[in-house]
Image (cartoon, rainbow, N blue to C red):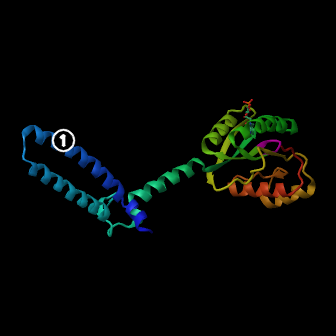
Amino acid sequence: MSLFNELKRRKVFKVGITYLLIAWVVAQILELVFDSFGTPDWVLKSALVLLATGFLFALFFAWVFEITPEGIKSQQEVDQSQSITPQLIKSIRENKTANRLLNSIIYKSHSKDLANLDLVESILESSIRNNPIHGITGVLIVTETHFLQVLEGEFEPLNATFQKICLDKRHDTVQLISFTEIKERRFSEWAMHGIGLFDLNRELKLKLCLEFGEDQGNIRLPTTATEILHLMDMLLSEKTPGKDD
Ligand SMILES: Cc1cc2nc3c(=O)[nH]c(=O)nc-3n(C[C@H](O)[C@H](O)[C@H](O)COP(=O)(O)O)c2cc1C
């Protein structure tokens, strides 16, 4: 680090300039006061010498000591990661990043009526209209009886969308499976990608039943986030009947 940067980091410039400004105001006041009391010249001169000495002390203290969260410490004592300046910068950076943090919601719900492609279409129509405005992406799996949905986006709009979906009368028993921070979107290319599991071919049905289990002749729908994402990956790598955007 150059001497200039180090002087800047230790706030030597800031302290020096602030001191000079205050000293100038003090000198003006002293001059006025001493004048009006007819004080001998040497008193004002001595005061100016004191102020000048104080200036050197101020620079010295600024160089040697630093403000830390535990109080004023000498530079040698200060672990640079403890200095308040980098800490502030770090917290601002963290805050900024926090605002841009992505979350994902995974839930399962029960369809009130037997679901069909028309229902999928109608849900996708509103999803594709609304989700891009709120930066939401995701995938929706629809069976005759259930929905599995992954929603991705920033915390506030994601929460708001999820709350709206929860109020939808077309489904009930909404079970939140996970609400978690994610580093990046899995389904960034889809405002909402719909997959209807209505007319699965025998081969795929067997494959899914073997992987996830069977429930009254149908695939047992997974209930953990890992399994659901795995199911989505499997379905997305297949050519499945369904609708998408
Ligand atoms: C299982 C399910 C998933 C849904 N997913 C979404 C969605 O991702 N985005 C969305 O805007 N609406 C979704 N909806 C529809 C909303 O509940 C709501 O009907 C719709 O957003 C209203 O849109 P509008 O206010 O533009 O008319 C979903 C509904 C259901 C039943």
Asked where in the image residue 174 lies, by quadrant, the reply is top right
Position above or below: 134 against 222: above
Q: Is residue 178 visible?
A: no
**Quadrant including the C terminus:** top right
Using a 10 Å C-alpha cutoff, classify the residue at mark 1 as few (fewer than 14 neighbours), some (14 to 19) or many (20 or more): few
Identity of the residue drawn at 52% across and 53% down? 93
**Quadrant including the N terminus:** bottom left
Identity of the residue drawn at 76% across and 51% down? 221
The part of the chain drawn in magenta is 141-146
Can residue 7 be found in the magenta stretch? no
Q: Position of residue 97 (x, y in %)?
A: 57, 52
Going by the image, does 192 lie left or right of 6? right
Q: Position of residue 237 (x, y in %)?
A: 84, 58
Q: Amino acid at mark 1?
A: Ile
Q: Position of residue 119 (x, y in %)?
A: 83, 36
Identity of the residue drawn at 10% across and 48% down? 41
Residue labelled with disc 1: 29
Whereabouts is ligand 1, in terms of quadrant?
Answer: top right
Secondary structure beneath disc 1? helix
Viewer-closest of 237 and 43: 43
